[in-house]
Image (cartoon, rainbow, N blue to C red):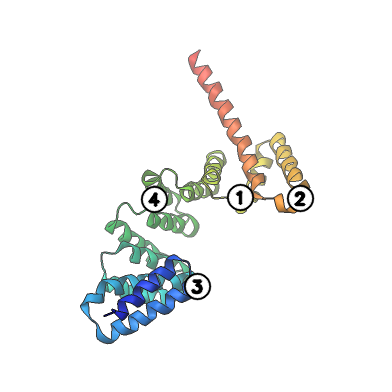
Amino acid sequence: MEDQPQTWFERGCEANQNDEPELALGYYLKFLKAYEKGLDPKYDESAGYAYTNIGKLFYDQNRHSEACRYLNLAIKLMPNYALARYNKSLAYYGLGSFEEVLESAAEAINLDPQYIDPHLISARVHIYIHRDFPAGMKHLAKALELDISCGEAYYLRGEALYASGKLDPAFRDFRDAMLLGLPTLRLSGKAWDYARRLSEDYYRIWNETVMKMNALPEEKRRPYDVVFIFFDCIRTKYDRERAGDDQAGDR
């Protein structure tokens, strides 16, 4: 005989994996209606996952208060589930409750020290909200220790360095973030500003690159290519300087 509530839960998970949020939400809610009516302990674990996934789905829809409510229910059932606490930190971020973001993220890290995402959202709060760059850098160092190829960690570290006036290392991090697949148009203005500060030569390279991009057919334009090429110039500059330093040290 088919276990109807469990079937609804499994269909919700399948829809969620297939990026069908409304279908997933419908199945999860049907499952939870049956669960909350009978409170059968055999469904406790599935209910914990359902509450967690609904919380994330509501977060994605900017329904942050509802997300928190469902994530609290998930944590009540599964207090050691790090993902529920991390998703709760996302919902708090959407609500602007930044101290609660840090608290929930810290709980997730304590439950799973190898979990990188809570470090990233903690860094965002420290860098963008508190302007506490050393605290943000501490989380980013841990994130990069866990995954040296984490593009978002390089990007956030670049933001902290840029805001601290450390432009050269900031742009090394921005370029690494782009190489790792995080193109962002927000870098365009910063690259232009850096080109202007760096020298007339770099300012000229920046303008020439923009002109070349604008000459391309519209379907071939990718604005972040401008930033990428500029970062290539910066990397070349550093490679040459490093080679010069090495040669000086050999003398």
Alpha carbon separation for disc pair 4 and 1: 22 Å
Amino acid at the residue labelled 1? Leu
C-alpha distance separating marks 3 and 1: 27 Å
Tell me the crowding category of disc 1: few under 14, some 14 to 19, or many 20 or more residues within 10 angstroms, Cα based: many
- Tell me if 67 is positioned left or right of 171 in this view: left
The first of marks 4 and 1 along the sequence is 4
Q: Nearer the viewer, residue 143 or 49?
A: 49
Q: Residue 44's x, y, as percent?
A: 25, 74
Residue position for label 4: 139
At horizontal 71% and vertical 37% (from top left) the residue drawn is 205
Secondary structure under tag 2 reads loop
- For the residues labelled 2 and 3, the Cα–Cα distance comes to 36 Å
Circle 3 is placed at which residue position?
Answer: 61
Q: Which residue is mark 1?
A: 187
Which mark is in front, 2 or 4?
2
Give how far across and how far down residue 93 sits, in percent: 45, 66
